[in-house]
Amino acid sequence: MSSQIYVFICVLISIIIQLSLAQVPCSLEDDPIQLAECAQLDVQAIIQAAKGNLKLFCNLAERYMECFKTKTRNCIGGSIAEGGFTELQNLAQWCCVNPGSPEPDECPLNRNPKCFSGDDFVSMANGEKKLLRELRPGDRVLVMNSQKQVEEDEVIMILDSQPSRPALFYSIETETGHRVSLTGNHFIAVNHNNHFVPANQIKTHDMVFIHSQGKLQSVSVRNVSEEYKVGYFTPMTSQGTLIVNDMAASCYASVVSHSLAHQVLAPLRWWYRFAKLFAVEQPFEYTPAGGIHWLPQAMLQITEKYLPSVLVKDSL
């Protein structure tokens, strides 16, 4: 029995050797640094994309994919770069269009308002946590009021629901270990005069607010990182704020200030309260994966036409 196993192992080794010799020689065997260069180009492309330079991103993405195809083919180490290759391939498909063509909505780098990651958790009024992607109009949640106090509030509507679209998020982590992911122009509450600052302007040691034992506590930011995630959602409350992953954030993005966005969207709050007086169960219809609601979409289009100066033009 042992001799049969020995023969089998010898045959198996022989087959593996023959298959290895039959492959096209790996171009990285003489210069393995080339694989690292391909991986480095991947990182550079994503960094440039984060700066909103779409043309440069597309150029770097093309170079990286060519690097991957020509230098890592048939290499054992080539699998290291496959994740970056797939990511850039998807981003290039979403974002890199013919010159002169409008930027597609699917591109994570476009200027459309975005918001929270669907993977984060909302603090509910009953003390439980709920995935943000599962939040619905009428849900009772915890928010921050204008006096920087925690209070109960209600989700009025979901301004935008995009469970399958990607976006670039800024993940803000505090010294206490709290972490929230917001798109670049989405506002987060900070403990200084501006009150709300876009996520892409948050720096290390900035002071943000966390929810602890029923109160808001000011804590320092430890790190801010960038990452692509799939799925983003924009719930709106009466106060215009939300406690997500125990951190206080605005419901608004892509405008010059949180307070201005809150004023512009006041008619939606008025209608919600009026409809509730007449026992309307759901004043604003909601469809999961329905995209941006037609009402804020119409308001955005009017603003872009008549008051473009109040919108943030930076893509990220």
Image: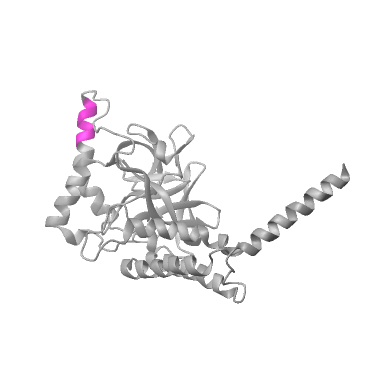
In the image, 63 versus 301, the foreground residue is 63
Residue 316 image point, x, y percent:
34, 61
Identify the residue at horizontal 61%, vertical 76% (top origin).
30
Residue 204 position in % (x across, y down) = 48, 65
Residue 55 in which image quadrant: bottom left
Comparing 125 with 122, the one in front is 122
Relative height, residue 174 to residue 45 (above, below): above
Left or right placement of residue 104 versus residue 247 in this view: left
Q: Nearer the viewer, residue 230 or 246?
A: 230
Q: Is residue 203 visible?
A: yes
Residue 274 shown in magenta: yes
The colour scheme used to paint the residues is: one colour
Horizontal and vertical percent position of residue 52: 33, 65
Residue under the point 20% across and 65% down: 100
Chief secondary structure of the magenta portion: helix
Residue 148 in picture, x, y percent from top left:
39, 49
Q: Residue furthest top?
A: 279
User: Which span is picked out in magenta?
Assistant: 271-277
Tell me: 311 left or right of 213. left
Quick one: 312 or 276, which is closer to the camera?
A: 312
Q: How many labels does the image show?
A: 0
